[in-house]
Image (cartoon, grey):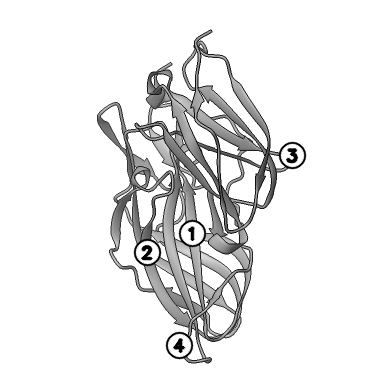
Amino acid sequence: MKRAQFVILFAIVAMSGLILSSCEKDNNKSEGKATVQLMLTDAPAAYDAVNIDIQEVMLHTETEGWVTVAIENPGVYNLLEFSNGLDVLLGTIEVAPGTLSQMRLVLGSENSVVVEGNEYPLTTPSGSTSGLKLNLHSELEGGYFYRFWIDFDAARSVHMTGNGKYMLKPVIRMFTEASSGAIAGNVFPSEFAPVVTVYNETDTLATFPAADGHFMIAGVPEGTWTVSFSSILDPLPIEEIIVPNVVVVKGETTVLADVTLLPI
């Protein structure tokens, strides 16, 4: 099975929001407003590119209703450029204190996926007009700065239909730096097409390492996790490596020892 044809089999959740309260005091701001910054990141996928046309982001607060976040560069973003610890700023907004309850991501029509050098349009059954909605719950205080990451899981968001077309069914989660941690490391060699999976009894996260073997999975809730190093090739060419009892602390990155995959 070729890497670009692989689909990771997880329990699929259509849309899931993970928001945990975190903030830092902004000494340059008045007490009246909270500053919210939105970053875009991605869990990698086995495609050449996943291009998403982001036109607008809206937030809903109990004090102001729906407000529009000015996008720094509205247009097409290749999600695969923002993985393994990389991200991009979408926009920043000042809002009155209160409960941040929802986010709405409005897409344009220029969505596509590139598979083995061929570009295919991504059908979006919803989201172009009303927006992809996430239910959130985060308390915003005046004078504080909040940074949220929109984690767009490309691997679980792109689906090939029976007639050879591709459909976008976004799987998105959100996390904050100070209330979650990260797991990072290196896995070799790249010719085994490794995949890194982090899981516990309630959640599963995964990533494909970069070409140099480096990986980072951000937004991992605090707790104890198991890390699996395997391959997306079929038949499996290596022995799966399991690292149990990996402790994640909020606001910190847990760095694992380098892993070398061995053939069966």
Decide if residue 28 is in sight here. yes
Bin the neighbour count of mark 4 within 10 Å (Cα to Cα): few under 14, some 14-19, many 20 and up: some
Q: Position of residue 188 (x, y in %)?
A: 43, 24
* In this view, 56 is above or below 67: above
In percent of width and height, residue 206 lies at 54, 37
Calculate the distance from the C-alpha at mark 4 to the C-alpha at mark 3: 42 Å
Q: Position of residue 139 (x, y in %)?
A: 63, 76
Measured from the top left, where is residue 211 in percent x and y? 34, 31
Name which of mark 2 and mark 1 comes first in the sequence.
2
Q: Quadrant of the N terminus?
A: top left
Q: Where does label 3 land, which residue? A: 201
Q: Which mark is residue 90?
A: 2
Q: Secondary structure at mark 1?
A: strand
Front-most of 29 and 185? Answer: 185
Q: Amino acid at mark 4?
A: Lys
Foreground disc of the pair 4, 1 = 4
Mark identifier at residue 29: 4
Count residues near mark 1 (Cα–Cα under 10 Å), then give few for <14, some for 14-19, many for 20+: many
Q: Residue furthest right?
A: 201
Looking at the image, tell me whether mark 4 or mark 3 is earlier in sequence order.
4
Q: Classify 49 as above or below 218.
A: above
Determine whether, in the image, residue 120 is placed left or right of residue 162.
left
Which residue is outermost to the top? 264
Label 2: element kind: strand
Q: Label for residue 149?
A: 1
Q: Nearer the viewer, residue 177 or 112?
A: 177
